[in-house]
Image (cartoon, rainbow, N blue to C red):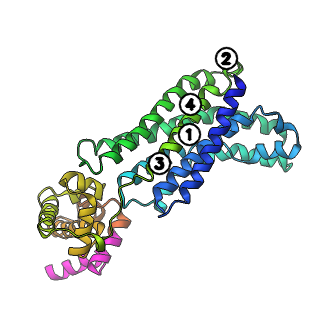
């Protein structure tokens, strides 16, 4: 039975690596392909590590043993963020990772720390006994932090998906269903992991648990997830809703007028621009107009894009509020946030881009005109 599980995990890991390569080679290049590929690669490396722990070939040569110690195969901390961003990239065609998003991946240092200690031992810079105790402690209790990290990002993913529930038209509903399936599968993995993790973290039951079951209760489900996510995820990449070029997209005149009116109502009556998290997909869900139609109308007929269109309303709202607000009681940042801007840096950049002046210069002009 052990041999069967070994081969199951080995072939699952190889499949994850292979499909990851196929995804990054897909054309046209899309961010969601790279995010799914990274997710598969990390899961595959963890599975391969579990398969190779007791493999006899690992001790056949000194350099293989050293390589296994310093090569970071178990890097699980980024799995939660990658899952969250993959779901976002499915639901938001205009979503792009930014430098600000890199903070979500800082905890990867916890994964890399034991490998750093092992490298110092092999370089003769640290005593083996001390390093072994440090590595064992990190490997045991970092698992709890990995579980917590995945839990947090699964909650974020579920909350993100729920804001679209019941608000999408039939064109985008399959995207939501696929993202929902992925999230449910990871929730199942999280539950199975918790049942294994609790006795694993208790010193009195840890050794007996590993002697009786090994790591199979975790990595067999991980391998099944790799098989399912790899095959179905790769096939799904061929079913994505095509992005229609504005030049090739012919929209009837009455549809243009109705779309413009719906957008104007969404901004001026419903004031959706006040929501910092407003996206093209969520606007499509509220108005009932496909995102590609909104994008085409904005690009072709209003000569703007989604972000610029929404930010125009935010800037105008800021101008009105700043003229009506006592600046001794409120800061510019608080006024900007109340107008829908998500950060001070974004507000400064957008305001200058759309008005040709910094917010401070606008206030000086206000003071001069009011004096």
Under circle 4, the secondary element is helix
Identify whether 250 is placed above or below 285: below
Q: Which mark is residue 226?
A: 1
Identify whether 32 is placed above or below 348: above
Q: Which quarter of the rendered picture does the N terminus lie within?
A: top right
What residue does disc 2 label?
204
From the viewer's perspective, tell me whether residue 167 is left or right of residue 131.
Answer: left
The answer to which of 25 and 219 lies nearer the viewer is 25
Q: Residues within 10 Å of mark 1 (few under 14, many from 20)?
A: many
**Residue 356 image offset from top left, x and y in percent:** 29, 81
Q: Earlier in the sequence, mark 3 or mark 2?
A: 2
Q: Residues within 10 Å of mark 4 (few under 14, many from 20)?
A: some
Q: Earlier in the sequence, mark 3 or mark 1?
A: 1
Under circle 2, the secondary element is helix
Identify the image quadrant of residue 69.
top right
In this picture, which residue range is highlighted in magenta?
Answer: 348-371
Q: Earlier in the sequence, mark 1 or mark 4?
A: 4
**Residue 194 image offset from top left, x and y in percent:** 53, 26
The answer to whether residue 115 is visible is: yes
């Amino acid at each position: 039975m052990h041999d069967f599980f070994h081969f199951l995990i080995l072939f699952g890991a190889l499949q994850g690596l292979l499909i990851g390569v196929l995804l990054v080679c897909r054309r046209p290049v899309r961010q969601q392909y790279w995010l799914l590929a990274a997710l598969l690669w990390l899961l595959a490396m963890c599975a391969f590590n579990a398969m190779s722990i007791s493999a006899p070939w690992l001790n056949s040569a000194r350099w293989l043993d050293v390589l296994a110690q310093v090569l970071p195969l178990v890097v699980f901390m980024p799995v939660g963020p990658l899952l969250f961003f993959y779901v976002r990239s499915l639901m938001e065609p205009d979503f792009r990772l930014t430098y600000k998003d890199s903070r979500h991946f800082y905890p990867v240092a916890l994964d890399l720390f034991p490998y750093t200690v092992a490298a110092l031992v092999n370089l003769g810079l640290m005593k083996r006994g001390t390093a072994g105790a440090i590595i064992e402690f990190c490997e045991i209790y970092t698992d709890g932090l990995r579980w917590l990290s995945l839990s947090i990002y699964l909650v974020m993913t579920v909350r993100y998906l729920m804001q679209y529930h019941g608000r999408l038209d039939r064109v985008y509903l399959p995207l939501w269903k696929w993202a929902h399936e992925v999230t449910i599968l990871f929730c199942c993995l999280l539950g199975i992991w918790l049942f294994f993790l609790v006795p694993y973290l208790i010193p009195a039951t840890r050794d007996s648990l590993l002697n009786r079951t090994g790591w199979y209760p975790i990595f067999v489900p991980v391998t099944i997830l790799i098989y399912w996510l790899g095959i179905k995820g790769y096939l799904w990449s061929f079913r994505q809703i095509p992005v229609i070029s504005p030049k090739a997209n012919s929209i009837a005149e009455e549809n243009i007028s109705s779309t413009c009116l719906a957008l104007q109502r969404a901004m001026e009556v419903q004031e959706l621009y006040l929501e910092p998290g407003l996206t093209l997909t969520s606007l499509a869900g509220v108005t009932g107009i496909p995102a590609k139609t909104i994008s085409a109308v904005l690009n072709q007929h209003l000569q703007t894009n989604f972000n610029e269109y929404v930010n125009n309303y935010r800037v105008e709202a800021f101008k009105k509020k700043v003229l009506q607000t006592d600046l001794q009681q409120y800061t510019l940042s608080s006024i900007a946030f109340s107008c829908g801007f998500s950060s001070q840096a974004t507000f400064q950049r957008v305001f200058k881009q759309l008005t040709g002046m910094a917010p401070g210069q606008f206030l000086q002009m206000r003071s001069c005109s009011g004096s």
